[in-house]
Each structure stands twice: as structure tokens, then as C-alpha cells.
Image (spheres, coloured by chain):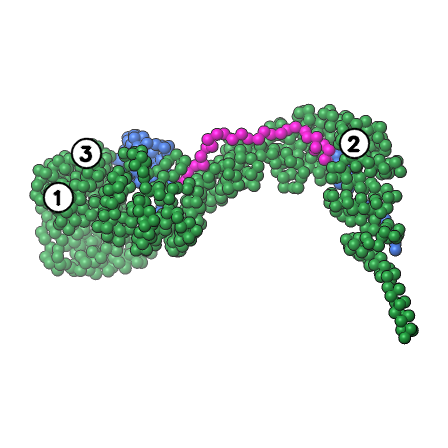
Chain colours: A green, B blue
Amino acid sequence: MSKRKRPARRARQRQPHTRTLDQRQLGLQSFRAGRLDDAITTWSSLAQHDAQLAAALAEAHFRRALMRPASQDQVADLQRATALAPGELRYQYHLGLALHRVGNLPLAVERYRTVLAHDAGWPGAGMMLALAALEQDAQTDLASLPGSTPEVLQSLASVQTLLRGEMPAPEGDGPVARLWRGLGLVQTGEPAAREMLDDARPLRSKQAMAVRSYYQGVAAARAGDLDAALHSWQHLSDQDTRMPWLQQNLAALVPLYLRERCEADDLETVVTIAQRWVPLATSSSALGEALVQTLDRAAHAAAAAEDWVRATALWEGARQVVSSSAALGSPRPLLHNLALAYEAQERWLEAADTWRAMLRTRPRVRPRDGALTTKERAAEPATPLPASSPSGQGLSEAQWSWVRARVIECYKRAGVPGEAVAIFRQAIKANPEDLALRLQLADALLANEQEQAAINELQRLLQIDPQYVEAHLRLAAAHMARGAWYMAEQTLRQVLRQHPDHPEAQRQLVRLLLEQGQYLLSSGLDDAAASMFEEGQRLAPDDYRFPLNLARIAINRLKPKRARPLLERALTLGAERPLAYAQVIECWAVLDEIDEARAVLRQAEAALPLTSEFYVDLGLLLLKRTAPRPLASPFAEPPPRPADTPWSRLAEEALDRAVTLQSGDVRLYTRIAVDLLELRPDLALRFAEEAVFVAPDDPRSLMVLGLAQALNHATRESKDTLHRAADLARRQRDISLARDIEALRRQVGSPLLHLALRMGPLFDDLDLEDEPF
Amino acid sequence: MAAPSVDPYAVLELPRTATLAEIKQAYFTQVRAHPPEREAETFKRIRAAYERLRDPEQRMETDMLLPTAWPEPERKRRAPQLDLTLHREDVLSAARSLSDLERRDWREHYGKVQL
């Protein structure tokens, strides 16, 4: 039994020593493998009583320090190394360097002195001591310091001179000497600094080269060469340089540079520079402002040239600048422009998102802003509020409403009409008390043709705030959209009972009265229509359409004497509107008062410059009013040719005046001919012939002529003309038109030709869009 | 929606802040200069511009369909001044960078470790 115990005891006695040996070797392995942390950890607990290990541990700390950047950790490692091996001067020296790097100059000086005390010729110690002393006091007598060899003094002489504010002596032409002299010239403000610093030879350190480059920029700026200055500093900015005034100088220089380039009309450079320095905008609001102005101007120019891609990129850059600094104000104008740019490119989703972003810039409004107090109502102007705020500073309610409509429209065009609805629903969940949001939701539902849902939402809103005028107005609009005129009217009247002078409510009611009145008039319900127009006239006394419609009612009732003053009033109110004159002339045509009609026409010609479109529309209107009724059946006998009446003569005069104003315009002749085909085929023939005279090779003009000939019973001529027209169309590779013409040609001489003409689509591609008066 | 391909303010040579009276005045001035019987197309543009601006609603729509210029700041922002002086810190940073402080390779100071 004892034999068994002895080996165990020996094994136990052997273990600590073996373990220590193992740890030393383990640590050594780590050290040799470069795993200094592991080596230090392994050796740290063992080095206390082991001088050899202490030296190894010191070396490990030393090497780890050399791998570290300048920091307190580096200092700590070197302090440990010197503590473990106080005799090692290299540890002392490097500790001095580490302390110097972290700015602890007194302790650094102490270390350098320690090194020099043991070895006066230690390489570098004299230089470092002198440098540290200079950093503490530029007036230091360097020659009195230990280790100050002539080389040390020569190396630092220029530095000391510069620190004293003096000019270094010219010593050699090496890159370092030129650097010091160049800095001296910068200090004294001499132009020669540029040339002195213009040295492409490398310096030993990146920082020295950065300093040289920076002051090259300073010298260039002083000489007024902003381009060179910006080039130097731009290059530096891309590197990691330790120069805090570089950013400040860039923030000062860039606006000056941009202004200079703008004056030289160098827009491309301006835009490139502005885009480059967007990230710098946070450092200076003046720079930010300059960048935004520059980018915005360039974007406007691009938009004017319809280069929307470029305009978008520029406005995005400007937006980025504004979003980086609250001092630059609201990004609303930029968001507005960006949204327009996206719409121009049909990027509907981005447009919708941008309009939404613009809505978020709206100043917060009181939830009950529709409910005006008595005082606020009294403060409102008596005349309708201006619809827009052209100064751009702040938008009116109508404009915000317009923006909301754009959000909805753009999502619709992007194919996600429900998106606006979803967005507003989401927003309402987060802010259920925000009534403006509920209103927007109602708008989105209306745009999504969910009228009932919109009405439900508005009614919910009005339960929360029964005084919310905007909601009432939307509700009225929703009712109108569904054709529920009575409900719309009741809603508007309710608003006006509480807010009699509310301009938008009045405007909507006026519109309702006009539309509803015209509908009743056309349905023969004159009395009901009259009461609508009379009320409309009270609400909108300057709108010529109400006295005009009342005159029509008087004419219907065979009371021309009552109609006369109403027509005169309509002309007075609509004196600047060609349509007013035409409509009044129409009334005189119904009354068969040719002299009155001519007088009104003379009045229109004296008051306004009239277009050919006006005369065409007038001529057609007069012919319609005095033409025989259309045939009930295409098989019925056609009526006799209309007699030459004063009205037909006036109509023809109007049409002739139209072509005089725009002579040689084939489209005009063709349009008139097409409109007259069924009404007055004889007149249509004349204009069709004139169109073909001007454009003999136009298959469409020939087609219209052929039809006019057919309607004037010139069957053979018609077929020939249509044959020529089809042939021309085929030669011009318009096969579809050729086929249509052939189909018409087959109907010539048959009553079915009238049916074919009434089908309509034949003339769609003639592009005879009516233009307004 | 179609953005106005022609800026009606530019056609009538008006600022965006023009009043109704100024718009009317500009219209008649332009019409006298470009009468319809002589310059039909130009007159049409002038007329169209006038129609867009005389009606408050149409004018609002026009204003919203035209890009807005970034407004001038109410107060001119003071730009930082260029600093063209020589900084002591730069002299020292150059001097330091040319000394042992920036040196990285110290292999000659490595000691041997033997255990």
C-alpha cells in the first residue's frame, strides 16, 4: 500500500513545477506566434519571482505597445515594460514617445531626459526632447538641452522660427526646407508662398504632406485662385487629415466658388461642386443655403428644358441639404418641385410618396379649424379668399386640398388607388383625433369611387365635430358625385345657415344652383329652374350665366320684353367672355331678332379680340338654331334645301370670318365641313372643296369631300373622290383609313350613309378637338 | 394632370405675384402687340395664359403645377470667413510627423526572448 502512495505523492509534488514550466513554454509559444495578449496573460502571474520571465513579459508588453495606436493603453503597456525591466532604455524611450503622443509633455520630457542621462547619444532622444520642449515653450533655448546636437538644432531651427512668428532662414532646397519656408511665407502673407509650396516631391509623412497641401490652398485662396484652393482642400477632405480648420475653410470657400462660377455662367461646374459638397452642409447654414440655391436654380433650368431626370437629381440633392439642417427651413418647395418632376416622368409612386411628404410639412392646424368663431368670421374678407398664395410662403387651404388630391390621384395612376385609403386609415389609427386626416381619408375614398364609404366617413367625422365646415362641404361634394342633388343642397344650406358668408359653401351652392337649374330648364321645368337661377343671381351677382338663363326662361314663356334687360345684363357681366356674346346671340336667334344679334356681334368685335374658333362655333350655333329638324328615319325623304335667311347669311359670314382669320388651315376647313355635313351639306361641300384645294393629297380631306358630294346627291363624283381618297391612304400606308373609306364608299347612294356618319368614330382621328371660346 | 407646357406668367411677362388688374393689363398689352389676325398662334397662347390666370381656381391650379423657386432667406446668412492664417498646431503636427512619433517600424529595438 505504501508503494502505491509514494508514486502519488511524488506525482503531486511534481505537478506545480511541471505546470509552471508548461506555462512558460505555453507563453513562449504564444509570444513567438504573435499572440501577445495570450503570452502576457500566461506570464503575468508567474513573472513576480522569475527574472527571466519578467524580461520576457516586459518584451511582450513592449511589442504589444508598438502594435497599438497612440493611446493610454499604449502608455500602460510601456509603463509595465519599464516597471518589469527598468534598465532597458529602449522601453523608457518608447514610453516617452507614447506619452508625447497622448499630449503628456512633462512626463515625456522626463523619460527622454532619463534616457539621455544614461546614454547621451541615444538616437532620437535629443531630437524628441527638443521637440517636446518647443511644444511647451517656443522660446526654449534648445542648445541648452541634453542631446542637442548640431543636427538637432538645424532640424528644429525652422520650426522654432515659425513658432516665434518669424521667417525661417533659407537652408537648402529639400522638400522639408521648402515646406518650412513656404509656411513662413504664408505667415507673412507673401504671394511667393504659392511657388514655394508647389513641390510635388514626397515628404516622409502623410501629415506633413497634408499640411503642405492645405497651405497650398491657403496661398491660392489668398491669390484669388479659388479653383486651385478648392482643388487642394477637396483632395485633403477625401483623406483622413487632422486639420479642424479644413472643414471650416471649405464651408467658407464653396459658396464663394459657386458664386464665382455662376457669374461665369459655368453651370455644369457649379452643379458638380454643389452636389459634391452636400454632406458638408451640416457645418454651415450659409453653405447649406448656397448649395440649395445653386441646386434649385440648376434644377429649374433643367425642368424648363424638360430634362426631368436631371431636375429630379438636383432637387433630391437640395432636399438632402435642407433635411440636414433645421436652420434652412421647410423642404416644402423642394418636395413640391420633386413631386412635379416625378409626375412629369410618370413615376407615380414616387410622386405620391413625395406629395405625402409635402403634406407632412403642413403646419399643425386646430382640429376644429372649420368651425370659425364669430370674431374669425368677422375678420374674413367679404370677397372670396384668394385661391393661391403666390409668394410661396405658406399654402392656402385650397392649395393643401389640391395636394391631397394629388396624393390620391398619383396612387390611382400607380395602380394602387387603395394605397391612399390605406395610408390615411393607418394615420388615423395613430391619431384618431386628427380630423384633417379623416377628411383626407374621405377624399381618398371619393377618388377611389367609394362614395358611400366617403359619406360614412364624413358622417363619422361630423359626429365628432358637427361644426366642421370642411366636412360638410365634402359631404355635399360626395352627394353631388352620386347625383343626390337634394342632399347636397340641404347640406350646403345647413352650412350657410351657420356661416352665411362662407365663400366655399357659397361657391358650391352657386355651382349646384346653376347645374341643377340648367337640368330643370332642359327638362321643361321652367318655374323650378327660375327659382334656382334667381337665388344663384343673389349669391353670385357678377355671374352672367344667371341673367342669361333667366332670359332663356323668359323667351320660353314668350316674354321677349322681359328677356331684353336680362340679356343686356348678361352682356355687361360677361363683357370679357366670348362665350357670353355667343350665348346671347343664340337667344336673339331664337327670338328671330337679326338686328339685335348683329348688334351683339359688333359689340363683341369691339370689346374683344375674337378667334376663328369663336366664329366657327357661332356660325354652327346659328345654323343649328335655324336648321330644319333632323330626319326621324334615314329612309324618310330629305327636306328641301333650306332657304337663304338672314340667319343663314349671318352664320355664313361668321364662318367666312373664321377662315379669313386662319386662311390656309386645312384642319379648320375640314372641321367646318364635318360639322356641317348633316346640318347644311351644301355649305359643307364648299368648305370641303376649299380643304382639298389647299391639301389635294390629304386622304382625310378627300374623304370629307366625297361625303359632302354624296350628301349633295352627286353620287358618281362622290364615289370617284372616295376611291381616290382610299388609294392615297393606301399609298401613305394608312390601311385602316383606306378600309374605312372603302366602307363609306359602299354606302354612297344608300340611306345607310347617314347612319354611318352618325356612328361617330370615323372622324376621331381627324383630331378636330373643339377649342374653347 | 398635365403640367402647363408653357408658363402663363412668362407668356404675359408677369411675376407670380401679379394682381388681377396687372394680369388684365398685361393681356391687353400682349394682344395689341400680337393681334389675332396677324399672329393667330401667338394670340392663342396669350389668350390661354390669360384664361388660366384670370380665374382664381385655375390660377391656383396653375401655381401648383409650376415649380416653385426656393425662397430667398429673410436674413442673409453670415458665411464663415476664410481663415488664411498659419496655425501653430499645423507647424507642430508637421514637425511631429517628421519625427520618431510617426515612425512605425521599430524592429531594430526588438529584444530576444529566451526561456
Residue A4: x and y, percent?
89, 73
A668 w.r.t. A726: above or below: above
Residue A223 is drawn in which quadrant?
A: top right
- Image mark 2: chain: A
Q: Please tell me which residue is depicted at 74% across the width and 37% down the height of the picture.
A: A103
A26 w.r.t. A272: above or below: below
| A141 left or right of A658 in image | right
Residue A377: x and y, percent?
30, 36
Q: Is label 1 in a helix, a strand or a loop?
A: helix
Labels 2 and 1 share a subunit? yes
Q: Nearer the viewer, mark 2 or mark 1?
A: 2
Residue A494: x and y, percent?
24, 45
Which numbered disc flags the more N-terminal residue, 3 or 2? 2
Foreground pick, A418 / A189: A418
Question: Which residue position is annotated with label 2?
Answer: A133
Foreground pick, A399 / A318: A399
Which numbered disc flags the more N-terminal residue, 2 or 1? 2
Q: Name which residue type carries label 2.
A: Ala
Measure the alpha-carbon separation of dots 3 and 2: 96 Å
Q: Is label 2 in a helix, a strand or a loop?
A: helix
Q: Can residue A93 be seen in this view?
A: yes
Q: Please tell me which residue is depicted at 80% across the width and 44% down the height of the picture.
A: A79
